[in-house]
Amino acid sequence: MGSLDDSFAVHNLNNISCSMGEVTNSQQQKKKIVIGDDGYVLEDVPHLSDYIPNLLTYTNPLQHNPSYSVVKQYFVDEDDTVAEKVVVHKNSPRGLHFRRAGPCQKVYFEPDDVYACIVTCGGLCPGLNTVIREIVCGLHYMYGVSRVMGIDGGYRGFYSKNTIPLTPKVVNDIHKRGGTILGTSRGGHVTKKIVDSIQDRGINQVYIIGGDGTQRGAAVIFEEIRRRGLNVAVAGIPKTIDNDIPVIDRSFGFDSAVEEAQRAISAAHVEATSFENGIGLVKLMGRDSGFIAMHATLASRDVDCCLIPESPFYLEGSGGLFEYIEHRLKDNGHMVIVIAEGAGQELVSESLKSTDPSGNKLLQDVGLWISERIKEHFSKQKKMLINLKYIDPTYMIRAIPSNASDNVYCTLLAQSAVHGAMAGYTGFTVGPVNNRHAYIPFNRIIEKQNKVVITDRMWARLLSSTNQPSFLRTRVDIIKANKDEEPPTQLSDDNLMEKQVLAK
C-alpha cells in the first residue's frame, strides 16, 4: 500500500452520518476521512500541518538513542493503520481503521523548544501517577525534552492555581502511590481562560488525562487552539475505572479496580457463609456501565446475583429478585449479591435530579436502599430470618495504586501519546483497538458511552456462572433488548460510511 496522501482521496467533512454517529453542532472537530480500495476507510486524526503551513520537520532523536536504535522496524510506517473490527465475513469490505500509534521517523518539534504540560481531571483512578510518570520520562529519555510542568487541580488549575515542575527525579516513584500528585477536580472548564493560559505560557504540548467528560473538554480546547492557529499539540489519555469509553479495548485502572473489588466480594462471602441465611451485599462503582460488577463477579465465582444498570430488574412477583433470593437461601443457606451503583435507579422513588460539576447525574445509594427493601420483605413474609451485611468499597477501589498489568498498560498509553504529539498529531486520544495502540479522533471517544451488552456472550457467561434469572419478564422484553443493544454489523457500518462519503 502506498502513501496515504498519494494513494487515497482525503475528505475533511463536517456532517458524515455513519457507524460512529451523527456529528452535532457541539462536536466541531472536522472528520478527516481517507477512502481506499476494497471498502478501506481510515478515520484519521488532525495534524498540525493541516492548519499551519510550512512547518519544519526534524529527525527523530530515537534514531540515535542506544535503547531504541537496535530495534528493527521501531518506527511506524505512514500507512500503518489498525482495524476497528477484526471479525468480518468472507466478502466484507476492509472496514474502518485508525492510525497506528508509535514513533515516526520525522518529528515536528525540536526537543529544546518543547514546553509540555500535563493535567488530570475528574475522579480518581488507579494508574494516574503512572501515566504522569511515563509522560515525563518518555519526553525526557526518548526525546530529550526537559521542560514539563503539571497543572495543579484539574482544568481550573490552568488559570487559578500554581504549576508543578516535573522532572524524572520528581516523578521517580509516584507510580507506587494512589491518586494523582497533580490533584484533580470536576468542572472548571472555561475554554478561553485555559487556551489563554496555554498561549501566554508558551506551552506547545498539552497532555490531558481524564474520562469522557474530560475528553469533551479536550476536544473544545483543541478546536480553540486550531481556531487561533497555535502550534500546540493536544493529546488525550482516556481514564475511567468504569471502562465506559468507546472504541478502545479497555481504559486504564479497570483491571486494578476489578482486582481490588475481589477483596470486598470475598469479605461478603465470608460474612454470608458464617451465618444462617446470610446475605452479603456489595456495591461497586458503575454509574452507567456495569463492567466492574460483571468482571468482578466472573472473577470471583462466589457471587449469586449481579445487578447492573444495563439490565433492569424488578423485586416482587414471579421471577423477581425477592423470589430468587428466597430460592437461593433455601438451596445454599447463603447468598452474595453484587450491585453496580447505577443499577435500579428507576426503582428508587426519590432519585435525585441534580448533577455534579462534571454533568453526571447524582445517584441515590442503591446498595443501602435495596438492603433495606430485602430486610423489609423477609421481615413481612416471616418465612425465614435473614442476616444481611452491606459492604460499600466504592471509593476504596479507585484510590489504590495500579497493579502490574495496569502499570504496563499506562506506560504504553503514555509513550504512545508522547510519540503522537512529537510527530505533530493533535486532537486525538490514544488507546488500544484490538490490542494495537492507535490514535483516535476526539469525536469518536465522546460520542457515546461503552456499555455492557446484555445480549452478548459475556453477559451470558455471567448468567451461567451465577445461575440468576435474566429478569426479562416476557419474550417482548427479550426482543427489545436484542433490538436496542445488538451492535451493527461490519458490513452495514462500512457500506453506510462509504456511500455517504462518496455522495459528498
Image: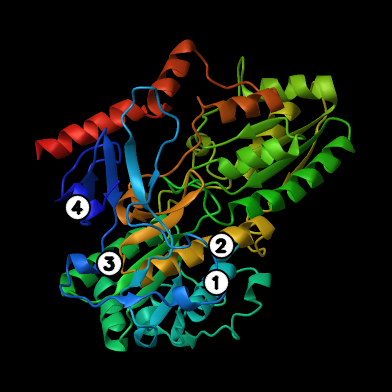
Kindly identify which numbered label has been placed on residue 6.
4
Q: Residue furthest left?
A: 504
SS class, disc 4: helix
Mark nearer the N terminus (1 vs 2)? 1
Q: Residue 113: x percent and y percent?
A: 34, 86
Q: List the residue tagged with mark 2.
A: 410
SS class, disc 2: helix
Task: State the CA–CA distance, disc 3 to disc 1.
Answer: 23 Å
Task: State the CA–CA distance, disc 4 to disc 2.
Answer: 35 Å
Task: Name the front one of labels 4 and 2.
Answer: 4
Q: Residue 117: x percent and y percent?
A: 41, 79
Task: State the CA–CA distance, disc 3 to disc 2.
Answer: 23 Å
Mark nearer the N terminus (4 vs 2)? 4
Question: Of the residues shown, which amino acid type is indicated by label 4?
Answer: Asp
Q: List the residue tagged with mark 1.
A: 134
Mark nearer the N terminus (1 vs 4)? 4
Question: Of the residues shown, which amino acid type is indicated by label 2?
Answer: Cys
Task: Name the front one of labels 1 and 4.
Answer: 4
Asked if the residue at tag 2 contacts the one at tag 1, i.e. Cβ–Cβ closer than 8 Å, the answer is: yes
